[in-house]
Amino acid sequence: MTKIKQMHCSRRLVLLTIAGAVAQLAGCGGGTNVSGLSSGGTGSFTTGTITGFGSIIVNGIRYDDTIATVLSQDDETSSSQNLQLGMVVNIEGSSLTPSATATGLPTATAHRITYGSEWAGPVSQINVGSSSFEVLGNRVDVLSTTLFSAGDISTLTSAQFVEIYGYVDPTDGHIQASRVEVSTTQSSVFKLSGAITQINRANRTAIVGNTAIAWGTSVVLPDATQDRSFVRVALAPTPAGTTWTATKIGLPASPLTNLSRDQDYEAEVHGTITAYTSNASFVVNGIPVNAASVSPAPQLSAGLRVEVKGAIRQGQLMASAVEVKNKQQIEAEEFEFYGFVSNVDTTARTFDLRGQTFDYDNQTEHLEILSLNPPPYVEVKASRAGGRWHALEIDLED
């Protein structure tokens, strides 16, 4: 370990110590608790947003995606699309290897990664003041951590089209956006997800979120669809009046059904409760959760953003801990990047890493690392605000 790294007491060491104590109180058995996910399993599974690179970082775990099969959740076909910050992904991987340093992250090898957006369509009703806009009549909530492929909410126009990654609240029809892909080109298919209501099977009509849809005889509404079921819908890009024509309607399948290895999976799932039976039985991002062993049980309901940790058993996530996340907590979450520092500008107080530009100030920890020559390979913890990255801490990565 370098002298610079030895000089600093990392806050991550404190956090990991606290996390381990909390996990023991929550009843997690076996293994070394790292970032909420135990290393006691022979495999790992996680669902959440990509919050860093080197290879990809999801829910505080560095997954090497070199050999991973990357699939679209829309059609389960292989994809060469580059994974981007803010995308929501499911990752099936190897067991975790704890970090060798206090500042590092646990690592694993990703075997299978599925990704998918929730909504796609034209931009309307832009309200910069309320940090929101609409797609197909449904509200998109933009957080300080929402990533845009170009510009930000202040540069959106009604002439543009977007593809939204994030988490849908089935109770109010809003989506909390984690990534917004912006384009001036209309796609051949629009997308929408949310609670379906006012189902009329005879007339083949319904409402998804706030959007009226209709479908022809070639489209099958799944028999299990009930009032307020969470559905994903593909839509023709031209409406008939105020009604959009559905070309496909589906109930989201649990990502757990695609696990391909006979392993003991430790799991951490971040997302929205899309179906709620009780505090002990609910669904997050299509994943059935059994939280009967969590004590004390938090008060839950449909639409809440949660983090659930536990182990996968017989097609469900057996929860050992459940935590509700509010907007302030989500916006306070850090991003992490690994790579070589370049273009250090001491006047502008910026530097580049992995194609991103970071601001820094006197509160940024370990600034002396930026003066090293040759430029070192580092880990950067950063926050997102005002469309810019701000470096909170810089550490040497062995």
Image: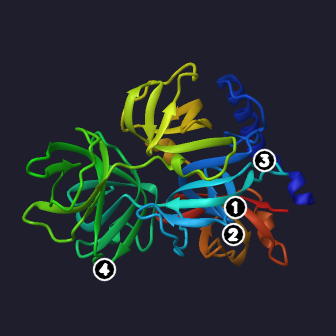
Q: Residues within 10 Å of mark 3 (few under 14, many from 20)?
A: some
Which corner quadrant holds the N terminus? bottom right
Residue 129 seen from this side: no
Residue 376 is situated, as x and y percent measured from the top left of the image, at: 81, 72
In the image, what residue type sits under mark 2?
Thr
Query: How far apart are the two marked residues, 1 and 2, measured between alpha carbons?
Result: 22 Å
Question: Do the CB atoms of the residues marked 1 and 2 lie less than 8 Å apart?
Answer: no
Render colour scheme: rainbow
Q: Which label's residue is closer to the chain start, 2 or 4? A: 2
Q: Nearer the viewer, mark 2 or mark 3?
A: 2
For residue 10, the mark is 3
Q: Quadrant of residue 274?
A: top left
In the image, what residue type sits under mark 3?
Ser
In the image, what residue type sits under mark 4?
Thr
Per the image, the residue denoted by label 4 is: 184
SS type, badge 3: loop
Residue 375 is situated, as x and y percent measured from the top left of the image, at: 80, 76
For residue 66, the mark is 2
Residue depicted at 34% across the width and 48% down the height: 251
Which corner quadrant holds the C terminus? bottom right
Residue depicted at 64% across the width and 72% down the height: 350
SS type, badge 1: strand
Q: Nearer the viewer, mark 4 or mark 3?
A: 4
For residue 380, the mark is 1
